[in-house]
C-alpha cells in the first residue's frame, strides 16, 4: 500500500511498492515452475486435475499483480499532472484494489503451497480428499485436541513448540527473562502463563501460507533483528521462500542470521541434533494407517 505524501516522497513510496510486487511476482513464478514440473511428470487424472486448478490460480495471481504494476507505472507517469485531491483519490483507489487483490493472492497461494507440500510428501490423496473424508479428519483432530492437556503448566525454557494438535506455535523464551518481565508488570499480568500466552504464542495460521510466511519472517529477521538493508532482506527472503524443509516459525525463532545459518547447515548435513540454539518440538496427530489393500492399489 502507498502512503500519501509530497511528490518526492510519494515517488519513493511507489518505487518501494513496485519492488514488493515484483517480489510477489517472483514467488508466483517459482511456484509456477514447480507445478509445471509436477504436471509434466504425473499421469493419474485426479492429481493432474488438481495441479491444473492450482496452475490456473497462479495465472490469476500473476494477472492481478501485473495489473497493480500497470496502475503504479501509470501513476508515476501522470502524478505531476494530478491535483492534490485527484492524486489522493487515485492512491486511495489503488490501496483499496491492492487490499482486495492481495487477499485473493494470499488465499490462492496458501492452497497452492499446501498442494505442492502434500505432493512432496506423497500425500496427493489427502489433498484430493472429498468433503466427507475431510470432515472425518477434522473431527478426529478435534477429539485428539480435547484429550491433550495444556502445556502451559509445565513451562519449557528455550523451546520452539509447533503444535498441529493445539493449532498453535510457542516461540522460544528465556524463563528467567519471562519471570523478570512478569514481576515488573504485575499490574498487567496475573501469572507467567499469561505472559507466554500473550507474547510468545501464536495461532498456527499466523505462519501460513508457509511460503509467504518464510518470506516475511526472513525479511523481518534481516530488517528488524539484524538492522540490515532491504536488498539483503529480500535476498534472504527469496532464498527461504522455496526452502520447503524450513518451517517459518524456525526463522521467527532465530535471534540472528548466524543462528539461522547454523540451523540450515545442520539441516543440510542431516544433523539437526547438533543444533543447540534452541530446542524444537513438534506435536502432530497420529497418522491414519491405510489398510494393505489400499496401499497395494496406491502403488500400482
Image (tube, rainbow, N blue to C red):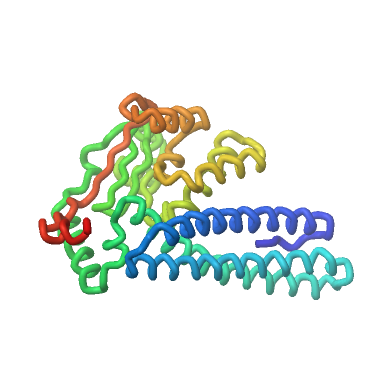
Measured as percent of width and height from the top left, residue 32 is found at 52, 59
Rendered view: 288 above or below 71: above
Rendered view: 262 above or below 77: above
Q: Residue at x 65, y 56 (%)?
A: 22
Q: Which of the 4 image quarters holds residue 40?
A: bottom left
Question: Is residue 198 or residue 240 the one in the foreground?
Answer: 240
Q: Is residue 190 visible?
A: no
Total marks shown come to: 0
Question: Is residue 27 or residue 125 the one in the foreground?
Answer: 125
Q: Which of the 4 image quarters holds residue 291?
A: bottom left
Q: Residue at x 41, y 40 (%)?
A: 250
Q: Quadrant of the C terminus?
A: bottom left
Measured as percent of width and height from the top left, residue 176 is found at 35, 29
Tell whether 261 sits left or right of 24.
Answer: left
Residue lying furthest left in this view? 292
Q: Quadrant of the N terminus?
A: bottom right
Measured as percent of width and height from the top left, residue 127 is found at 31, 63
Q: Is residue 84 visible?
A: yes
Q: Residue at x 28, y 52 (%)?
A: 164
Q: Residue at x 25, y 43 (%)?
A: 152
Amino acid at each position: 500500500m502507498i502512503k500519501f505524501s509530497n511528490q518526492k516522497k510519494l515517488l519513493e513510496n511507489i518505487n518501494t511498492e513496485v519492488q514488493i510486487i515484483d517480489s510477489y511476482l517472483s514467488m508466483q513464478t517459482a511456484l509456477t515452475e514447480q507445478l509445471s514440473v509436477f504436471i509434466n511428470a504425473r499421469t493419474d487424472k485426479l492429481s493432474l486435475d488438481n495441479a491444473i486448478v492450482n496452475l490456473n490460480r497462479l495465472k490469476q495471481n500473476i494477472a492481478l499483480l501485473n495489473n497493480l504494476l500497470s496502475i503504479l507505472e501509470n501513476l508515476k507517469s501522470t502524478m505531476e499532472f494530478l491535483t492534490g485531491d485527484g492524486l489522493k483519490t487515485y492512491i486511495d483507489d489503488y490501496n483499496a484494489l491492492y487490499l482486495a487483490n492481495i487477499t485473493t493472492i494470499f488465499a490462492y497461494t496458501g492452497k497452492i503451497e499446501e498442494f505442492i507440500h502434500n505432493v512432496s510428501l506423497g500425500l496427493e490423496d489427502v489433498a484430493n480428499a472429498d468433503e466427507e473424508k475431510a470432515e472425518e479428519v477434522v473431527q478426529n483432530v478435534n477429539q485428539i485436541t480435547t484429550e491433550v492437556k495444556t502445556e502451559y503448566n509445565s513451562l519449557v525454557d528455550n523451546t520452539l513448540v509447533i503444535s498441529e494438535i493445539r493449532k498453535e506455535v510457542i516461540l522460544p523464551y528465556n524463563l528467567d527473562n519471562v519471570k523478570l518481565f512478569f514481576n515488573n508488570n504485575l499490574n498487567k499480568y496475573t501469572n507467567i502463563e499469561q505472559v507466554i500466552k500473550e507474547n510468545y504464542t501464536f495461532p498456527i495460521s499466523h505462519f501460513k501460507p508457509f511460503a509467504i510466511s518464510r518470506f516475511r519472517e526472513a525479511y523481518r529477521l534481516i530488517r528488524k533483528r539484524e538492522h540490515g538493508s532491504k536488498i539483503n532482506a529480500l535476498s534472504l527472503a527469496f532464498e527461504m521462500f522455496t526452502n520447503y524443509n524450513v518451517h517459518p516459525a524456525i526463522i521467527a525463532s532465530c535471534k540472528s542470521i548466524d543462528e539461522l545459518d547454523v540451523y540450515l547447515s545442520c539441516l543440510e548435513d542431516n544433523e539437526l541434533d547438533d543444533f543447540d540454539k534452541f530446542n524444537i518440538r513438534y506435536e502432530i496427530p497420529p497418522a491414519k494407517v491405510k489398510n494393505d489393500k489400499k496401499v497395494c492399489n496406491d502403488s500400482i
